[in-house]
Amino acid sequence: MADRDHPAPITPATKLCAVLGAPVAHSGSPAMHNAAFAAEGIDARYFAFHVEPEAFETAVRGLQALGAIGVNVTVPHKAAALAVADVAGKRAQEAGAANVLTFAADGRILADNTDGIGFIRSLDEAGIALRGRRVLMVGAGGAARAVALACLEEDAAALWVANRTPGKAEALIAQLTAVLGDAAAGRLRALSLDPGEMTEALPQADVLINATSLGLKPGDPSPLSVEQCRLAQDAVAIDLIYAREPTVFLKAAAAAGLTTIDGSGMLVWQAALSWQNWFNRTGPVAVMRAALRNWLEREPS
Ligand code: NAP
């Protein structure tokens, strides 16, 4: 049977890829990868599977037994994905998490992390270099760690992490210091979201990143207000969230006159770079981007 996203029929030779998460109902990954498989003539289909944490390893081993090529992994499974792998690449080891697993022919499960490099590629595409720039990131979860490492590896002059739970920002700074050693010295600082601390920090920032999940749900407040964004004059505001409409953070940043970038470029690039693990080449970025755009337009918000 052929389907809307792929003109070739499914046969016994058709291979399987998937994203595993909880939730995954709103994932744009199947649209991107299936359009890319069709465009590149790859006989495979990509599914989204909702998997609860207690079933994650069983699901991974089941997909391996079915001969799947590999999987992407999203919240809350990225640390578990690293743990289930037999071999982890440097990016996954440093991030302490994997968003790509590959089922190798010799039976091993290989882990990679393309979130951080996907973030950097999306900035390259937008003509933004982080070298020498001061980054203020709000959020200290899994995505924040991969993005923070990428910012430091791109020679950002400073990386300040502000989080609702300040202890998690401090823990992230400690992890980054453990991974990067002297290369991180003097560049890192943990903050809370306390208005006084933010008023001092924001005027020093060249780049603002929202790495919280604020903006995913309707009615979420912005992690930074318009007035706070105004303190970071001339900064670039980046949200890791991708959505049809600008997020509440990007609306606040735009109202303050800042340049804005959403998370769709990062999503497209982490997907395209997943293909390096599965097919030894980067996926077709333009096809994936167009498919994501179409999917976001179709998806009920
Ligand atoms: P996570 O590990 O669950 O971390 C969530 C972060 O959001 C934590 O720092 C948390 O602070 C903060 N947060 C949650 N609710 C908050 C609230 N009401 N007020 C203030 N802070 C709040 O999630 P993640 O995996 O890092 O993902 C973070 C975001 O990145 C998500 O929106 C996800 O969609 C996006 N993302 C995008 C891509 C992409 O390719 N574009 C890839 C990965 C992730 P506490 O520590 O205080 O709880």
Image: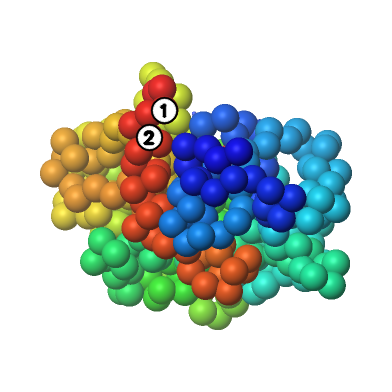
Quarter holding the N terminus is top right
In the image, what residue occupies the spot 19% across and 50% down? 259
In the image, what residue occupies the spot 75% across and 33% down? 52
User: Which residue is more in the foreground, 41 or 288?
Assistant: 41
Q: Which mark is residue 299?
A: 1
Q: Secondary structure at mark 1?
A: loop
Q: Quadrant of residue 49?
A: top right
Residue 124: percent from the left, percent from the top?
31, 67
- Residue 220 shows in this picture: no
The answer to whether 95 is drawn above or below residue 237 in the figure is below
In the image, what residue occupies the spot 68% across and 68% down? 93
Left or right: where does residue 3 sit relative to residue 129? right
Number of other residues with Cα within 10 Å of mark 1, as a class: few under 14, some 14 to 19, many 20 or more: few
The residue pinned by badge 2 equals 296
Residue type at tag 1: Glu
Quarter holding the C terminus is top left
